[in-house]
């Protein structure tokens, strides 16, 4: 079974530029998460989708971050404009457990962003 | 909002010694999960605990969920160099369905 795919693996941009990350979850997984992991910290939830609807985006900096999951499969996370503090690894995860339950999260390899 | 704290932040042990990391939540959890992240890798699921007072074992790893469902621990017996990595707890529950809040992790170093 293929895992969660993410691209690009690495991205270096200058502040105020924009960047987009792509995630393809495990086939059939209804729940998709984007986490931000700053070096030395635990993953911080940015947004959670259930199929193509947003369940939780309370910690997403909406003035610069946006995410979508069209057709309930792939997802993109965009940052525009980027700030220095956005340097982090952006982890996509998916789960097969729908609705109210919390199931095992399967993480992708992550996209490492460096903002100069 | 829900906060999950982990201690210690770092732990250095000699191979063969035991290791324990502790996780505390500011609110009652519906469940808790544990993940391991190897250096340069991504978090990998270890286990989920759901019931109050639950204890689960995986070979040398023992996981506990507190009676009040606000704390948890991971104990590794006789560490090996392959145990190196960061161990995260992640608490589920509250008003956000399916949301997991991760602790800051405990970095384990094992000296051969």
Image (spheres, grey):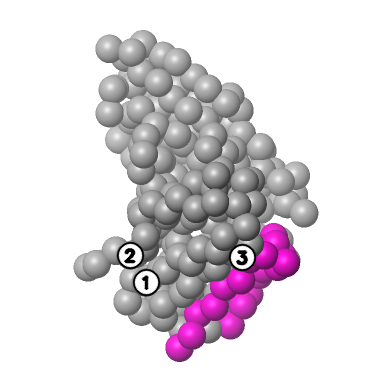
Which residue is denoted by mark 2 in the rendering? A5
Q: Secondary structure at mark 1?
A: strand
> Is circle 1 on the same chain as circle 3?
yes
Q: Secondary structure at mark 2?
A: strand
Q: Chain of mark 2?
A: A
Point 45% across, 15% down: residue: B12
Look at the image and tell me in which quarter the C terminus of chain B lies.
top left
User: Magenta stretch containing residue A60, yes or no?
Assistant: yes
Q: Chain of mark 1?
A: A
Point 29% across, 22% down: residue: B80
Q: Position of residue B96 (x, y in %)?
A: 68, 67
Residue found at the far bottom of this picture: A71
Point 50% across, 80% down: residue: A69
1 and 2 marks in contact (CB < 8 Å) = yes
- Looking at this view, is B58 or B34 the one in front? B34
- Please tell me how crowded label 3 is: few (under 14), some (14-19), or many (20+) other residues with Cα within 10 Å: some
User: Magenta stretch containing residue A55, yes or no?
Assistant: yes
Taking the image as drawn, is residue A3 in sight? yes
- B39 left or right of B25? left
Q: Secondary structure at mark 3?
A: loop
Q: Position of residue A5 (x, y in %)?
A: 33, 65
Looking at marks 1 and 3 on the same chain, the residue that comes earlier in the sequence is marked by: 1
Taking A44 as reference, is A63 above or below it?
below
- Please tell me how crowded label 2 is: few (under 14), some (14-19), or many (20+) other residues with Cα within 10 Å: some
**Boundaries of the magenta span:** A53-71
Numbered label attached to residue A24? 1
Numbered label attached to residue A80? 3
Report, in whole angstroms, how far the alpha carbon at label 1 lies from the one at label 3: 21 Å
- Please tell me how crowded label 1 is: few (under 14), some (14-19), or many (20+) other residues with Cα within 10 Å: many
Q: Position of residue A103 (x, y in %)?
A: 47, 63
- Looking at this view, is B6 or B52 the one in front? B6
Looking at marks 1 and 2 on the same chain, the residue that comes earlier in the sequence is marked by: 2
């Amino acid at each position: 079974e293929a895992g969660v795919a993410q691209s690009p693996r690495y991205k270096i941009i200058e502040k105020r530029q924009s960047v987009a990350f792509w995630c393809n979850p495990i086939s059939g997984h209804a729940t998709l998460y984007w986490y931000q992991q700053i070096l030395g910290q635990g993953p911080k939830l940015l947004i959670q989708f259930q199929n193509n609807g947003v369940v939780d985006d309370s910690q997403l900096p909406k003035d610069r971050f946006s995410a979508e999951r069209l057709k309930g499969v792939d997802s993109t996370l965009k940052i525009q404009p980027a700030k220095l503090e956005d340097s982090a690894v952006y982890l996509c995860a998916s789960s097969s457990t729908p609705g109210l339950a919390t199931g095992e999260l399967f993480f992708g390899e992550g996209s490492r962003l460096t903002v100069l | 909002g829900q906060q999950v704290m982990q201690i210690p932040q770092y732990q250095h042990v000699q191979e063969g010694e035991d290791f324990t990391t502790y996780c505390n939540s500011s609110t009652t959890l519906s469940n808790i999960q544990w993940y391991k992240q190897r250096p340069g890798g991504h978090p990998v699921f270890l286990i989920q605990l759901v019931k109050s007072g639950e204890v689960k074992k995986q070979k040398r790893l023992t996981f506990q969920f507190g009676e009040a469902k606000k704390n948890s621990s991971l104990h590794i017996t006789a560490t090996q160099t392959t145990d190196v990595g960061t161990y995260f707890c992640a608490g589920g529950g509250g008003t956000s369905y399916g949301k997991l809040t991760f602790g800051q992790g405990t970095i384990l170093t094992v000296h051969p």
